[in-house]
Image: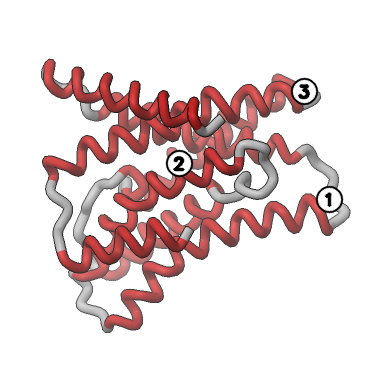
Amino acid sequence: MALPVLVGASYAYVHTLNKQYAKPISIFTAALLLCITVINFLPEVFEHVPNKSYAGIVILLGLLLQLGLERYSNGLEHGHVHNAGQVKFYISYIALLLHSFVEGTPLLISVNGNSLLVGLIVHNIPVTIILMQLIKHLNYSSFINLTLISMLGLSTVGGALAAQYITQYTELVFDVHYVLAFVCGLFLHIGTSLLFEFNRGKQQLILKLFLVVVALGLCLLLR
């Protein structure tokens, strides 16, 4: 997960993300996460879980968690920029780290981990750019900036390692696919929110449909 952090931070250090490009990037990342969730993860979940109703409840809980996190992250994971003071920034930052931790949990325990890895790389590049732009406004030292940015990538890796450790080296008994179901809820909320958010004008609709088709094609290649 160092790649999207490195790319996003390097770009943001030199440039400011143009709103003209921010929307298409956000739409594409949302479409890719949505396609991966619907085509890869949901079939895996409902194929393996013993209780389909419980799986549905867990998916809804994941969706509700993301809804709650956005109350504090101010939409950072959606690519939204809201310059604020240090207190509000750190509240948003902690919420973003929690989001990254949770979304990384299926990486090492799902058979579709490779497709998730590609989806998270694409998803985290614009998120890192936005985060770096906010950090620059706080006028911290380069070391603190690097630390704050690095924590974003490490939180995703931490989620993956924690889930793997719990499932392989502890006595906790639960189906790992419920973890995947929970993350599906997060991705469903992010994907649908962004796709419906940018819905003004015929040109945007055509662009959105094109990006969804591209994302769908990429998702099928990753199967």
Q: Quadrant of residue 31?
A: top left
- Which residue type does callout 1 highlight? Leu
In 3D space, how far apart are the residues under numbered discs 2 and 3 (Cα atoms)? 28 Å
Percent from the top left, x then y, of residue 175?
Answer: 78, 38
Q: Which residue is mark 1?
A: 172
Where residue 51 is drawn, which disc sits there?
3
Give the mark nearest the N terminus, 1 or 2.
2
Label 2 amino acid? Gly
Q: Are marks 3 and 1 in contact (CB under 8 Å)?
A: no
Q: Local crowd at mark 1 within 10 Å, few (<14), some, or many (≥20)? A: few
Residue occupying image coordinates x 66% and y 49%: 108
Q: Nearer the viewer, residue 99 or 161?
A: 161
Q: Residue furthest top?
A: 202
Residue 119 got which mark?
Answer: 2
Q: Secondary structure at mark 1?
A: loop
Residue 2 found in image quarter: bottom left
